[in-house]
Image (cartoon, coloured by chain):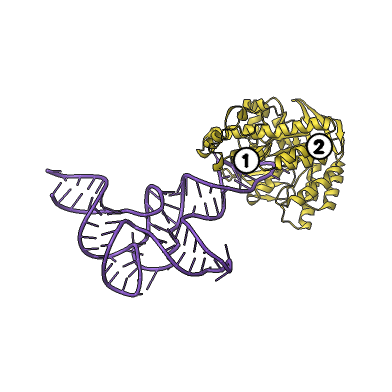
Chain colours: A yellow, B purple
Amino acid sequence: MKFELLNRDGSARRGRITTAHGTIETPVFMPVGTLASVKALTTEQLASLGPEIVLNNTYHLMLRPGVELIEKLGGVHKFQSWDRAILTDSGGFQVFSLSSIRKVREDGVEFRSHIDGSLHFLSPERSVDMQQRMGVDIAMAFDECPPYGWSREQVEQSMEMTHRWARRSLAARTGRSALFGIVQGGTHRDLRKRSVEEIASLEFDGIAIGGVAVGETKEEMLDTMRFTAPLLPSDRPRYLMGVGTPEDLLDGVEAGIDMFDCVMPTRNARNGSLFTSAGKVAIKNAKYAADDRPLDPMCSCMTCRTVSRAYLRHLYVNDEIAASVYNTIHNLSFYLDLLLGIRQAIASNSFASFREAFLSRFRGSE
RNA sequence: GGAGAGGUGGCUGAGCGGUUAAAAGCAGCAGACUGUAAAUCUGCCGGGCCUAGCGCCCUACGGAGGUUCGAACCCUCCCCUCUCCA
């Protein structure tokens, strides 16, 4: 993996990551395909939207179908018939999201499978090994993502363990996949600073900000991100994990973030919450019942080119599978288009005005 | 013609003397969703009033009477459905 910085516009950066599965123009949004599938889309449909990288999840693939099987079938790219880049989360997020069925120890985390109750152990070594065996382009270090309510002491201890795990993750690297480290530290600036110093000092190919958007207020999230991002080394990709809304992405880019992932466009699509240039559209709302306009006249995605709001509402209200397909195609297109616009704006040194123009439309009432 | 069962809020369907403006589900209306245990979850859901309170007043469990301090729940008559036998 190689990262080149192409140009800057203020703190915003435009760059290019080169992998064995193509190049990735940054800033980039990575659609989330937890189970080697972006929910509601076939691989071909996903490919037609043009993302250069997607995210898969180690914990979920470990349970089903199993890393052994994926390896045996020729790797995770071949398995899902995807020839562009893949990044996997290490399972660190499941330490947070599945906290009720797991036990954290110094050596790793014991999970009770949410599927059948079977016992599974994830450690830095095992997680990195599995990610490499699946053949992903970018693997993530195994970390502990602490919940928002924790005391400063708990967050600090957790962070220090994540640091120890970071070194162990690195030691398990064979070179088959790039490996990113993850900064923790909750909402505490001094902890974030220490975490950056520690993680950045290690030989990671990129650095991620983790443990964000886990229940803290928007202000705390933005403060943490804005404080931490500039501390990250500029010669490596900076990845803000799990974020976020369109506004969050603009704020992230402005702070110098290069990579984002978030379930928001895909999950919200399935729940009928659609992003348009004029703001969010809750497609189930009665006011769209007879609305024959395209969802977003400014959008050129397949959904907006071919069907009306009235039809999208009809599909959603009737629980038609096509509702999820159309909505996911649109929301992902919206995110990918937003990032394309951001890259072009940075290239022409007009990010600030691009951001303002986008936000004034997006925040203006629908 | 005979025997039996039943009629409850937009629908299905609990309730069977007071704690019932009436369970639950559906439908309807709105909201949430941030490294996915999510095609999920939450709230509202007869009407009106205001000093907005676990407040007051209407209307409501096929219809009309009755018993009772009190009835969707008990009694009488009527109307209407459904099943079975002729």
Is residue A38 or residue A290 the one in the foreground? A290
> Relative to residue A310, is residue B40 depicted above or below?
below
Report if the CB atoms under discs 1 and 2 are less than 8 Å apart.
no
Q: Which mark is residue A353?
A: 2
Is residue A126 or residue A225 the one in the foreground? A225
Q: Residue A190 vs residue B18: left or right? A: right
The location of residue B18, given as percent across then percent down, is: 40, 68
Amino acid type, residue under disc 2 in the picture: Ser
Badge 2 marks a residue whose secondary structure is helix
Q: Looking at the image, can residue A345 be seen?
A: yes
Q: Chain of mark 1?
A: A
Q: Chain of mark 2?
A: A
Is residue A25 or residue A337 the one in the foreground? A337
Q: Which mark is residue A175?
A: none
The location of residue A112, given as percent across then percent down, is: 62, 47
Badge 1 marks a residue whose secondary structure is strand
> Relative to residue A79, is residue A35 depicted above or below?
below
Res A34 → quadrant: top right
Please give the count of numbered marks on the rendered protein: 2
Q: Do marks 1 and 2 share a subunit?
A: yes
Q: Residue B25 vs residue A59: left or right? A: left
Q: Looking at the image, can residue A131 be seen?
A: no
Residue in the image at 81% along x and 37% along y: A353
In which quadrant is the N terminus of chain A drawn?
Answer: top right
Callout 2: few (<14), some (14-19), or many (20+) C-alpha neighbours within 10 Å? few
The location of residue A343, given as percent across then percent down, is: 79, 31
Residue in the image at 56% along x and 39% along y: A288
Amino acid type, residue under disc 1 in the picture: Val
Callout 1: few (<14), some (14-19), or many (20+) C-alpha neighbours within 10 Å? some
Q: Where is mark 1, residue-wise?
A: A281
Is residue B8 or residue B3 the one in the foreground? B8
Q: CA distance from mark 1 to mark 2?
A: 24 Å
